Amino acid sequence: MQLSPGAAALQAALARACPGAAPLAVAVSGGGDSLALLLAAAARPSGPPVLAVTVDHGLRPEAAHEARSVAAICARLGVPHSTLVWQGWDGRGNLQDAARRARMRLIADWALARGIDRVALAHTRDDQAETVLMRLARGAGVDGLAAMATERQALGVTWLRPFLDIPRADLRAFLTERGQSWAEDPSNDDPRFDRVRVRQALALLAPLGIDAEGLAATAARLGSARAALDACTAEAAARIAVEEAGDVVLDEAARVALPAEIGRRLLLGALAWVSGADYPPRAGALAATLARLEIAPRTTLQGCLLIREAGLLRIGRELAAVAGLSAPIGTLWDGRWRLAGPATGGEEIRALGEAGLALCPDWRATGLPRSSLLASPAVWRGGTLVAAPLAGHGTDWSATVNRPFRTRLLSH
């Protein structure tokens, strides 16, 4: 059957952004954008296997019905579907941001548990333009104004946005063409939310030539600038940074000699890689941290411990940030570490800590700082230390970081 121009455009966008035969997860809320993504992905004649997932945030009574509607559509299409429920809202802070973060974590965990490492999201050119305006209002720089990337690595998953160049209206037209209705979230018209006010402002700016198409084009150009800066930062890292047991060690004199923006990005990249934080620290916090290092040999920032010694700056994990963190064997601990060995049952991954390090008499032979080993991953069975690979205890166990530091610099 010959595709309409609109359907052909969606298929072409999916082919560019989601190539290969590996399974593809699709996040579907029941709204028009995500339903268009679902239908287009399921209709690819030689596309990869598609699975769908819906997150019910429990914030609206209609959400459960919308999830059931998505499940029914998926059943008709022959697409496996799961509904995940979030119950973590405590009524404080930024609701939309908290819901977005929770949604990403729930979906990432769901996908990885099924051996899926890529998830498609239905953001459109309109979403891109709205994001640019929101970040402009916050005084964002190149990274912020470059807005959303078509591909991003986070939480162990590759997040794909195949429709960033396609207007929202085209997706709705595609659904209408297919006879598919969709749900409208009333929060999309609630002026309490920044994105809604920005959407309304865009309509007022359009007569001045400031429209979604132009803003998305600006974001694309700034995305190219961001990629160039990332490449320069990765080149600097190759020269002056060493990854050691989950820490990043920088030649401090060489870092200071870098152009200010490259040096800043290198530090932020190291902090993000070590901490796994969703967002970098604010400029003022980073400046204050570097000022403290001028008068003291160590300080902390964003769950990281920074130590300046012998011309080097070591950025490692802060023990306090991981002291209560545990994970089953076979899963990622602290978002980075994977431990493998002869598990017999009942083991879990926790930080080595003071008590564990005391059980590793040969830890000094590793050459690693005590502070780094304290925050390193270890295998525990209850209160018994089974292995601490980085501290030289339990040679039949290994600890590896799932993603190298320099890779992180080029794909944040």
Image: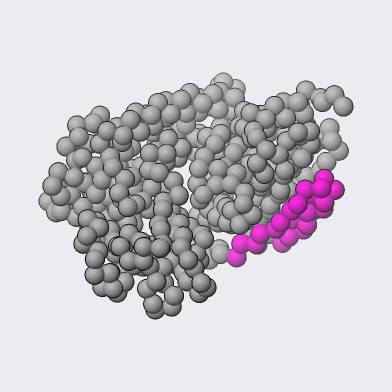
Q: In this view, does 276 lie to the left or right of 159?
A: left
Query: Looking at the rendering, which quadrant does residue 379 occupy?
Result: bottom left
Please provide percent x and percent y for residue 247: 31, 50
In what quadrant of the picture does the C terminus appear?
top left
- The single residue placed furthest to the front in the displayed view is 396
Please provide percent x and percent y for residue 81: 74, 53
The answer to whether residue 103 of the structure is visible from this angle is no
- The single residue placed furthest to the top in the displayed view is 209
Please provide percent x and percent y for residue 117: 58, 46
Q: In this view, does 145 lie to the left or right of 199?
A: left
Span of residues in magenta: 61-87
Depth check: give the residue in front, 196 or 283: 283
Which colour assignment does the render follow?
Answer: one colour
- Is 214 contained in the magenta span? no
Please provide percent x and percent y for residue 61: 72, 61
Query: Looking at the rendering, which quadrant does residue 269 occupy?
Result: top left
Q: Which residue is drawn at 32% across and 66% down?
A: 393
Q: Which residue is drawn at 45% across and 57% down?
A: 338
Q: Which residue is drawn at 50% across and 35% down?
A: 147
In what quadrant of the picture does the N terminus appear?
top right
Query: Looking at the rendering, which quadrant does residue 68 occupy?
Result: bottom right
Q: How many labels does the image show?
A: 0
Q: Is residue 44 placed above or below 9 in the rendered structure?
A: below
Q: Residue at x 72, y 30 (%)?
A: 10
The answer to whether residue 305 of the structure is visible from this angle is yes
Q: Is residue 389 placed above or below 412 in the rendered structure?
A: below
- Is 81 contained in the magenta span? yes
